[in-house]
Image: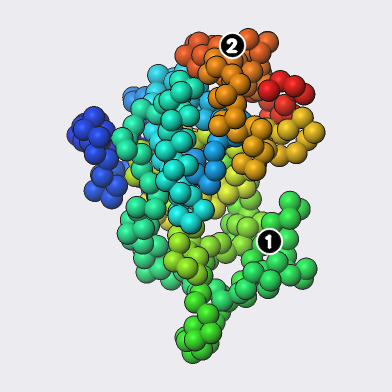
């Protein structure tokens, strides 16, 4: 991503050392804006260390899939001499109590994967005023409109769907007149969408390689804010990664399809995107996708059975970082880490590994 000036870097370092990260007041102005129609590059400047991040959603205790993402994010940054920041993605506070966030911080420290700052972490639930400013900027450009479609309307069989089952919004509310908006607002509060162009956004993922989507055909106008006022992930993650100075994002391949729309938002907001690395999903031995409902794979239960070194060693073995499940530490793995070691297809946990 574009680089901050020396003074801005010192400002960030000072705030982090003091344990006082001030979202919205520390706002780096990055390099030149991306040109319209250009394939977006994720090239990082080479004169400062990589800045990665953990961005867990505290809707439960971490499971092995979450841990694999944190491990690879930590290894990717540390193997380049970089740092890793922590942000708690708790936009939906009803689903994400602070107790789970506290447990995540404790789990990461116990495993030897503690973030380098800020202290306390950045909480998305504290940043609505910041997101509102960027929402307003897009609105001033005439790109935002209210959507009154119900969930049943959006997921109707007649609605356009992607091959993976995701709904492509058909633009039903895009052309509503002011009178129609006023009338429908009497019945229900609207969500808010951003209007996307008929444009192909392409990028080179650091692990998965080339990926592209046509925003209008493959994505459609997407949510920026829910009807209850909660800002959408797509806007919040772009704003937060930019303002925190994150220039390397490691996350699951289930978010690969979100990247083109986020890259488009970076461009529209005048922010330089990070380099993306999307990792394969970790599946249970029977092929199921892991979830926080799988209590036997949660860190809460695993901590009762294994040492940190045993968990890290078994997980490193599962994702191709070492030839056996022998106990090890993140620091030892970082010395030889390379993305070429990590599979691109989904990883099935060997039976009885944990």
Q: Does the image show residue 151?
A: yes
Q: From the viewer's perspective, is 268 left or right of 70?
A: left
> Which numbered mark, 2 or 1, is in the foreground of this view?
2
Q: Nearer the viewer, residue 89 or 74?
A: 89
User: What x and y, as percent, mark residue 37?
Assistant: 52, 52
Say above or below: 324 vs 58.
Answer: above
Residue 28 quadrant: top left
Q: Residue at x 51, y 74 (%)?
A: 190
The residue singled out by tag 1 in the image is 167
Question: Is disc 1 placed on a helix, strand or loop?
Answer: loop
Say above or below: 350 vs 205.
Answer: above
Say above or below: 149 vs 60.
Answer: below
Distance, label 2 to label 1, CA atoms, is: 43 Å
Q: Residue at x 44, y 43 (%)?
A: 99
Quarter of the image that includes the C terminus: top right
Q: Residue at x 56, y 62 (%)?
A: 222
């Amino acid at each position: 991503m574009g680089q901050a000036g020396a003074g801005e870097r010192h400002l960030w370092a000072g705030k982090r050392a003091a344990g006082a990260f001030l979202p919205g007041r520390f706002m780096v102005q990055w390099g030149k804006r991306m040109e319209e129609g250009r394939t977006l590059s994720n090239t990082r400047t080479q004169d400062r260390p990589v800045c990665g991040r953990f961005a867990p959603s505290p809707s439960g205790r971490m499971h092995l899939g979450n841990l694999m993402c944190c491990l690879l994010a930590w290894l990717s940054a540390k193997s380049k001499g970089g740092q890793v920041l922590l942000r708690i993605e708790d936009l939906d506070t009803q689903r994400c109590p602070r107790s789970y966030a506290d447990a995540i911080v404790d789990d990461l420290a116990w495993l030897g994967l503690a973030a380098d700052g800020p202290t306390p972490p950045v909480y998305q639930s504290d940043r609505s005023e910041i997101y509102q400013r960027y929402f307003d900027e897009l609105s001033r450009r005439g790109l935002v409109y209210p959507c009154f479609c119900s969930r049943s309307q959006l997921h109707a069989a007649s609605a356009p769907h992607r091959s993976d089952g995701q709904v492509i919004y058909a633009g039903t509310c895009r052309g509503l007149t002011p009178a129609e908006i006023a009338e429908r607002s009497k019945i229900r509060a609207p969500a808010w969408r951003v209007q996307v162009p008929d444009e192909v956004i392409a990028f080179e993922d650091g692990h998965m390689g080339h990926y592209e989507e046509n925003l209008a055909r493959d994505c459609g106008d997407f949510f920026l804010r829910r009807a209850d006022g909660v800002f959408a992930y797509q806007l919040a993650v772009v704003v937060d990664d930019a303002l925190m100075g994150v220039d390397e994002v490691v996350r699951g391949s289930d978010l690969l399809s979100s990247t083109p729309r986020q890259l488009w938002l970076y461009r529209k907001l005048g922010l330089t995107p990070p380099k993306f690395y999307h990792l394969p999903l970790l599946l249970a031995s029977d092929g199921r996708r892991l979830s926080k409902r799988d209590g036997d794979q949660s860190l809460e239960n695993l901590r009762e059975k294994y040492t940190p070194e045993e968990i890290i060693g078994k997980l490193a073995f599962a994702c191709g970082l070492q030839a056996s499940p022998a106990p090890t530490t993140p620091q030892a793995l970082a010395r030889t880490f390379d993305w070429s070691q990590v599979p691109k297809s989904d990883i099935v946990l060997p039976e009885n590994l944990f």
